[in-house]
């Protein structure tokens, strides 16, 4: 399961400043609220909410905050001013992008996303132009600590993972989309330190870019998209070194 796998190319989450973490908390809170509005407040019957809870916990959102957001969303009735809109396009060098947003103003969001692509050497495409190149998977990263590769791999298999990649400090555990929360909870119950747990759009193949100017354009596009308050997730198929 481990070794030279495409999973080793999954982008590691960089250490966040306090202000960046505050923004992450806000975005996750919005995801939780929308998940409740769309499917109810019971994670047992709302798989999207269950996945959002795993994501929130892995990002160290306090349990009290999670419960408060869920209760508030459940008590506000069926109205929901936010809608999920996904954009697809290409960055510099033909790198495929999927940009997932939650917005209360689709005109603003569309205008901003289009501007980012145009400014940084890319172009926004139509729905479906790149999504066929990606598949949704549950991605969990765990700290290795003193555990061996064999031990983590054995546990990952027993807990229901479909694939696994061991690296020096962290391991990536991959699940089927519907199994993310269950595998995450089993890891937590067995004292694993999870640093990330969420559904990700994983590319079937990656593109390697050697030109430094092109790579800079791609990385800048990723940064400006992730900084936008309406953008929840940014996926791409850039081969990382």
Image: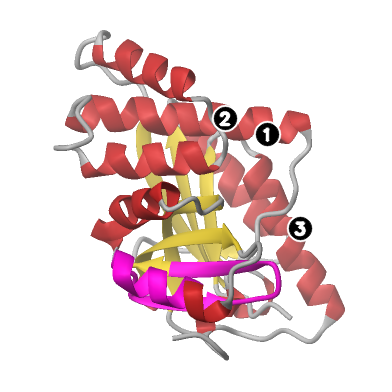
Tags 1 and 3 in contact by the CB under 8 Å rule? no
Q: Residues within 10 Å of mark 2 (few under 14, many from 20)?
A: some
Work out how far the residue at label 3 is from the one at label 2, CA to CA, in angstroms: 23 Å
Q: Determine whether 39 is above or below 81 in the image.
A: below
- Residue that appears at 37% across and 19% down: 67
Mark 1 lies on residue: 21
Mark 3 lies on residue: 220
Q: Determine whether 169 is above or below 188 in the image.
A: below
Mark 2 lies on residue: 25
Tags 2 and 1 in contact by the CB under 8 Å rule? yes
**Mark 1 falls on what kind of element?**
helix
Q: Which residues are magenta?
A: 152-173
**Mark 2 falls on what kind of element?**
helix
How far across and how far down the image is residue 51, in percent? 34, 45
Most extreme residue toward the right is 212
Q: Nearer the viewer, residue 241 or 208?
A: 241
């Amino acid at each position: 399961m481990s070794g030279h796998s495409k999973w080793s190319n999954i982008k590691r989450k960089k250490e966040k400043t306090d202000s960046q973490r505050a923004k992450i908390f806000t975005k996750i809170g919005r995801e939780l609220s929308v998940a409740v509005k769309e499917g109810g407040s019971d994670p047992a019957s709302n798989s999207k909410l269950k996945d959002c809870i795993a994501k929130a916990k892995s990002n160290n959102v306090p349990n009290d905050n999670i419960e408060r957001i869920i209760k508030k969303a459940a008590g506000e009735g069926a109205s929901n001013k936010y809608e999920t809109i996904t954009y697809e396009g290409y960055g510099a060098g033909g790198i495929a992008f999927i940009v997932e947003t939650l917005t209360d103003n689709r005109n603003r969001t569309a205008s901003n996303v289009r501007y980012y692509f145009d400014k940084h050497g890319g172009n926004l495409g139509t729905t479906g132009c790149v999504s066929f190149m990606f598949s949704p998977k549950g991605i969990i990263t765990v700290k290795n600590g003193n555990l061996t590769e064999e031990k983590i791999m054995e546990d990952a298999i027993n807990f229901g993972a479909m694939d696994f990649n061991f690296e020096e400090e962290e391991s990536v555990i991959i699940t089927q989309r519907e199994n993310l929360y269950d595998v995450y909870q089993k890891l937590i119950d067995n004292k694993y330190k999870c640093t990330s747990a969420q559904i990700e759009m994983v590319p079937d193949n990656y593109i390697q870019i050697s030109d430094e100017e092109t790579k800079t354009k791609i990385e800048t596009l990723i940064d400006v998209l992730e900084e936008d308050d309406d953008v929840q997730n940014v996926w791409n198929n850039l081969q990382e070194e």
